[in-house]
Image (tube, rainbow, N blue to C red):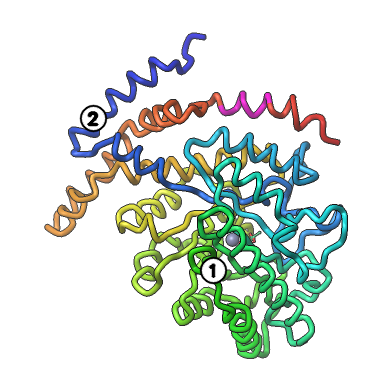
Amino acid sequence: MPGDLTDRHILDGYSLARERYGALGVDTDAALDQLGRISISLHCWQGDDVSGFESPGGQLGGGIAATGNYPGKARNADELRRDLDKAYSLIPGRHRLNLHAIYAETGGRRVERDELRPEHFARWVDWARERGHGLDFNPTLFSHPKAASGFTLASYDPGIRSFWIRHCLACREIGEHFGRELGTPCITNIWIPDGLKDVPADRKTPRMLLKESLDAILSRKLDRACILDAVEGKLFGLGSESYVVGSHEFYLSYAITNRVLLCLDSGHFHPTETIADKLSSVLLFLDEVLLHVSRGVRWDSDHVVILSDDLLSIMQEIVRGGFLDRVHIALDYFDASINRVAAWAIGTRAALRALLMALLEPTDQLRALETAGDYTARLAMLEELKGMPWGAVWDYYCLQQGVVPGKGLIEEVKAYEREELARRG
Ligand code: RNT
Ligand code: ZN
């Protein structure tokens, strides 16, 4: 078809792009080599609006919400895995999967969350092993009667607290099992919804309780070659607008003191605050961090990731700081108003495109200009880079990795919708 992107167009475009970047001292082949080694953790929960398989029709709680009712949502683990396979086939590179505890497969039997065991995830492990995906994990401390008060690990009720402590301990065992089975550490991330709608009278006690609960959970020493623990803070949620127990300062301090990973979710801060600026600070004091790459829009912190300035600065900071080995990149958003497979593919491709743009920067030159105080040239160079043919390098990367380039993604997703999603009631 005239105007279509053929292999020859892509190869021609790449060879011109390689020359242009070469003139700036940037090696495009080396950048693609590096990009190919980056594994992003895709969040299983985009595939079914954070429903999980615990109880049909269960309500999403914990101050997060998926809006929209696009048809074709996965109703069980087989459908979810099929959708994930489709999504991974649209994303160049080899990537991980981030599971939540509510995605256990218990064969129709109700298993309480504090009784979950590795065997309830056996099929996920087999699937991951076959396809070469590493697994990450999350205890689920929401969408449950014992979280209905809005409090879990910081609850004043010792029975509630100990239930959730047992759940988190069970999940750490599962995480360690994943890491051992798959030969890559499983990042096991704790996020809790605990907070208050209105002005608290006591901000201190719930935080003391949370600290105690976390100590009880994390003091059990597990093999760091198999599991890396992370903790995730937040500024506010729906129904916890005035106070969130696990705030950023709480978890930053906790992570530094206890040598666990800090999870920075890009949707969990004030609207003009970006996590890009935080990386070079926290990584002076922490070995590693986990990112939940997301996109905040007004009250929502979980829109599909797009190639925004914010995303680009996060990836630039990771690359410029030499942090690729110490920053684990995961995605966290849930949009039920568009095709869910497309949501995974578009968001992950955006994250990879931003990484590629960052990898194509002449970092040393930019730093030299800055060190010399030549801010004029630095600004001019940064603006120039935005117009460089990085898109041609991306297309070539897709071709190289056997993944559909350009808007071919749309046709692929539509075909999958006709052949698979349309058959779901
Ligand atoms: C919620 C946190 C958390 C969740 C997932 C489902 O605000 O971002 O990471 O999105 O655990
Ligand atoms: Zn998150």
Q: Which of marks 1 and 2 is nearer the N terminus?
A: 2
In the rendered image of this protein, does residue 71 appear above or below residue 261? above
Direction top: furthest residue: 2
The region drawn magenta spans: 409-415
State the image quarter where residue 352 is shown. Answer: top left
Please name the amino acid that badge 2 sits on: Arg
In the rendered image of this protein, does residue 11 appear above or below residue 154? above
In the rendered image of this protein, does residue 242 appear above or below residue 237? below
Q: Is mark 2 on a helix, strand or loop?
A: helix
Residue at 21% across / 33% down in the picture? 22
Instruction: Work out whether residue 117 or residue 5 is closer to the camera in this orientation and state it.
Output: 117
Magenta span dominant secondary structure: helix
Left or right: residue 411 compared with residue 62:
left
Left or right: residue 363 compared with residue 132:
left
Quick one: quadrant of the C terminus?
A: top right
- Number of residues whose C-alpha sits closer than 10 Å to that of mark 1, classed few (under 14), some (14–19) or many (20 or more): many
Please name the amino acid that badge 1 sits on: Ala
**What is the spatial separation of the Cα atoms under label 1 and label 2, in whole angstroms?**
41 Å
State the image quarter where residue 155 is shown. Answer: bottom right
As drawn, the label of residue 20 is: 2
From the top left corner, tell me how far across and down residue 331 is, in percent: 55, 52
Total marks in image = 2
From the top left corner, tell me how far across and down residue 134 is, in percent: 55, 51
Q: In which quarter of the image is ligand 2?
A: bottom right
As drawn, the label of residue 230 is: 1
Q: Which of marks 1 and 2 is in front?
A: 1
